[in-house]
Amino acid sequence: MERLPLSSKIIQGGMGVNISGWRLARTNSLQGQLGTVSGVVLERVLARQLQMGDPGGHLRRALSHFPFPSFSKEVEKHFYVEGGIAEGTQFKAVPMFTINPSKLLISLTVCANFAFVWLAKENNPNPVSINYLEKVSMPHIYAITGAMLAGVDFITMGAGIPFQIPNVIESIAEGKPVTYRIPVIGNKIKNHTVSFEPEKFFGEKLPISKKPGFIPIIASNRLANILSGKLPKGSISAFVVELWTAGGHNAPPVEILFGTDGKPLPIYGEKDLIDYKKLTDLGIPWYLGGSQASPEKLQWALSVGASGIQAGSIYALCDESDMYFEIKKTARKLGFQGKLIIRTDMLISPTGFPFKVAVLFGTLSEHDIYESRIRICNQGALVSLYEREDGLIGYRCPAEPIDQFIRKGGDISETFGRGCLCNGLGTTGGVGNYGEPAIMTLGDDLSFLLFLMKDENDSYSAQDATNYLLGY
Ligand SMILES: Cc1cc2nc3c(=O)[nH]c(=O)nc-3n(C[C@H](O)[C@H](O)[C@H](O)COP(=O)(O)O)c2cc1C
């Protein structure tokens, strides 16, 4: 099976929820860089965009190419609303993922991943990748099937140790049952394996002609060594090595201090540094991510052995990203003025990983907004599986209502400072629940804005960003 080589100097990072949509990935890919569609909760993004009336009809055009039309028609019938739902109306609920998802949720997940990749690749010969968070694991077997049906070229994955992905890719390509082992918090049950038989589900062989390459996102030499040592030779196309200055989730620091308010503060330092020489010696190409968005940094990365950089924030704030326009405009303006504070929040993410938060008025980054939000868990992407007293598997999230979390056996200390990223990031990506406050993430370095914007109200395209990075 064909596999495209990775030859670009820039990977536009995957950015969820719905920040790097198909337009941004497509634009970057057409320009010769690796454009990445965010695959995070795409099933929800598709369901909502269909309910928003699918402006331009792009999603329905993509779905009309889905190889099993009865399934895509069912999805469309269930979620598409001509002209869109009225403003202020709640979206139809998409069921939360469990270890036994419904037929509709499976179809929605496969179709969503198919449609976004298909649109990014429509009349586009260049490679496109899709990004997932390892921690959001229940949809993987369905999501990757959808992306592969659309011919995705690469899969990037961080926020966890993505050991199982090469096997998932192989199984889908070979028409075998696909499995994924998910950790379970419990005494007797330590993990649960979900499985999917695509051929049985669709009743036909899958028309897949390409195995995508695999790009794990890592933050230490140790993880690079483990992955390259344990996975079959050739299964890793490249690494993205992400520094702690990157937007989104970061790797935990080796050292943590506690502030006077009792909150943990990350102390990133020498122990968190990467040995680039040792990394290069593994013989696998690698890209450097995190505050690398300048022509000088790109050249520097190349000089220490990288094949290029992965950049996120510079593309998150460009015209083609799907970030909610008003939030993007404000962030760009404050960033241009040098007034946008970005903090590494050790608590907010239910994943337990540090998460970069942009301090913006009216978002969860503000104490009052955070405190006034009534906890609710109605998306469930970041739940952990746990062993219930009756021996069955339950689902809990430290950002859900505290009494509920404790009733499920969770420890109250885990709930402090947690925020609902599912809802908050959905709002920032323009597909949120009505009334849910946004939360925005960006990397530490926004100095590129001074080179790309004439004044604080200016904007720039993805092409402008790439030209700047390449020194044109
Ligand atoms: C808005 C935003 C959302 C992000 N979401 C994800 C994500 O869902 N998955 C992921 O692996 N990385 C995510 N990232 C990280 C980027 O893919 C990229 O690695 C990082 O932004 C690079 O650092 P930079 O922002 O300094 O360029 C996100 C970054 C931003 C700015």
Image (cartoon, rainbow, N blue to C red):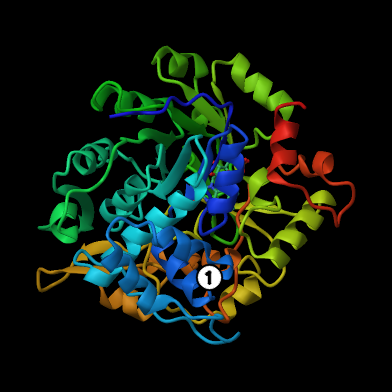
Q: Residue furthest right?
A: 455
Q: Which residue is drawn at the image coordinates 64% and 52% (left, top)?
A: 343
| Residue 126 in sight here | yes
Residue placed most toward the observer, 175 or 181: 175
Where residue 16 sits: x, y (%)? 51, 55
Above or below for 292 versus 277: below
SS label for mark 1: loop
Residue 46 x, y percent position in the rendering: 44, 66
- Residue 377 seen anywhere in this rendered image of the structure: no
Q: In this rendered view, identify the residue nearer to me: 253 or 196.
A: 196
Amino acid type, mark 1: Asp
**Compared to 469, does 415 lie above or below?**
below
Residue 114 appears at what percent x and percent y?
38, 54
Residue at 81% in and 56% down: 333
How many dots with numbers?
Answer: 1
Q: Residue at x 22, y 48 (%)?
A: 206
Circle 1: is it few (<14), some (14-19), or many (20+) Cα within 10 Å? many
- Mark 1 — residue? 54
Which residue is located at x 47 percent, y 26 percent? Answer: 6
- The answer to whether the residue bearing label 1 lies less than 8 angstroms from the nearest atom of ligand 1 is no
On screen, residue 55 versus residue 143, left or right, reads right
The C terminus: image quadrant? top right
Residue situated in front as seen by the camera: 237 or 350: 237
Q: Quadrant of residue 221?
A: top left
Left/right placement of residue 110 relative to residue 262 reads left
Classify the position of the N terminus by image quarter.
Answer: top left
Q: Is residue 270 above or below residue 311?
A: above
Residue 281 in the image: state x and y as whole percent: 42, 12
